[in-house]
Amino acid sequence: MALSTGKVHHEELWQELVTNLELEMHRMSGSAASKAVYAASKFGHRGIRLYENAGRLLGEEASKLSAQDCAHAAGAFLRGPGSLAEQVVLKGPVGARILELGFASFDSQALALMLDALSRAAPSTWGVESMASSVLEELHGRARELSADELAIVVRSLGYLQPQVPEVLQTLLDYATRAVKEQGSSAHSLAMLCQGIAMQPSLSDASKRLEELLPEVQASLQEPEVPSAESAVQILWSLSRCKSSRDGVLAACDKVLSTRATELSANLLVRLAEGMAAVSRTGWEPSQALVQKVSYLLDMKRYDLPRGKLWRAAKAFEALGVSKSIFLEERDQPTAAKSPRRQGSLKPGPEPA
């Protein structure tokens, strides 16, 4: 149960569960295995043994997998070791099962999860653009059936996949905004929606669309159940594309982050530093308390970052006027960086993805 939900917040316990899963994978059904490996991938586990064992089992159980199982498997393997993504999903038994079922048989949740999975693939992964185009074609035709949360996942995914047919993007954004207004939404989903809008460089009305969501975002940040620090980071970063009426929301993000920044990973702290710098360039200044806290935490967590990344935070702090806040070692310089792993622009035919 814990593995299927991913809701274990004790790292040592989680690692023990993952180790047991590696050993007991052969006893599981394909459905249970797809949920478990998906949860492990979301937690950040990338050990190849788990994925190899899951891949063998899913190959044996492929004919029994449901659409939801396929979406979970895709979400796991496209997050996991790149060498297995094509072997198991895009060119392998899970991909064959997806073709057998057809995307018309996927419900809206499974379709949203599939697009989310494809948006996380490495740039060189074979077959991503073609499959994402097919998924988006189905989603576009059923947009009115999607919930606010599902539409938020779709919009965030398109921020990475960069569709090249603006009419489809505009339609999905219209449905997403309408769903939020009618159904309400959590800070988590609103953060994904704002992020997806802000990531579209050619979206001429991005500022207007973000401004339209500000009342709902403000309310979500003031809910009794305090939003996560990660959601606050995404919202703050996104509002660098919003030109007006944003000060109240930014102040609420600042308050959440000043309290909860310690929960952020080193990678998210870099993103927060860049977000603060981006917003400051458009006329809003974060509190000194938040700036100092992020600087301190980044220095403390610097070795959790991949090589060649900390310089980005240092550059952001220079833009904020605190250039001496982070000392860069040789491993922190841009020349030490590896190539990024995000999927590139999607080039669909009649439909985008």
Image: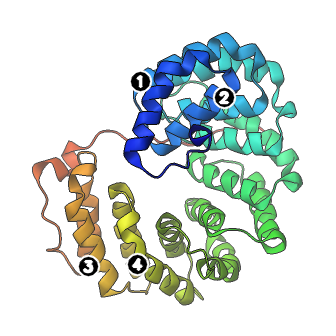
Q: Residue at x 88, y 56 (%)?
A: 144
Of marks 3 and 4, the one in the foreground: 4
Disc with the residue nearer the chain's start (3 vs 4): 4
Q: Is residue 270 left or right of residue 240?
A: left
Disc 1 to disc 4, C-alpha distance: 36 Å
Disc with the residue nearer the chain's start (3 vs 2): 2
Q: Amino acid at mark 2?
A: Ala
Q: Secondary structure at mark 2?
A: helix
Q: Amino acid at mark 1?
A: Ile
Q: Is residue 16 left or right of residue 327?
A: right
Q: Amino acid at mark 3?
A: Gln
Q: Nearer the viewer, residue 176 or 259?
A: 259
Q: Which residue is mark 3?
A: 292
Residue 123, numbered circle: none
Q: Is residue 216 above or below residue 177?
A: below
Label 4 CA crowd tier, 10 Å (few <14, some 14–19, many 20+): few
Residue that extends furthest to the top in the rendered view of this protein: 60
Q: Amino acid at mark 4?
A: Thr
Disc 3 to disc 4, C-alpha distance: 13 Å
Of marks 3 and 1, the one in the foreground: 1
Q: Which residue is mark 2?
A: 32
- Label 3–label 1 contact, CB within 8 A: no
Q: Which residue is mark 1?
A: 48
Q: Nearer the viewer, residue 330 or 168?
A: 330
Disc 1 to disc 2, C-alpha distance: 19 Å
Question: Residue 180's spot in the image, x, y percent?
Answer: 77, 69
Q: Secondary structure at mark 4?
A: helix
Q: Is residue 333 left or right of residue 71?
A: left
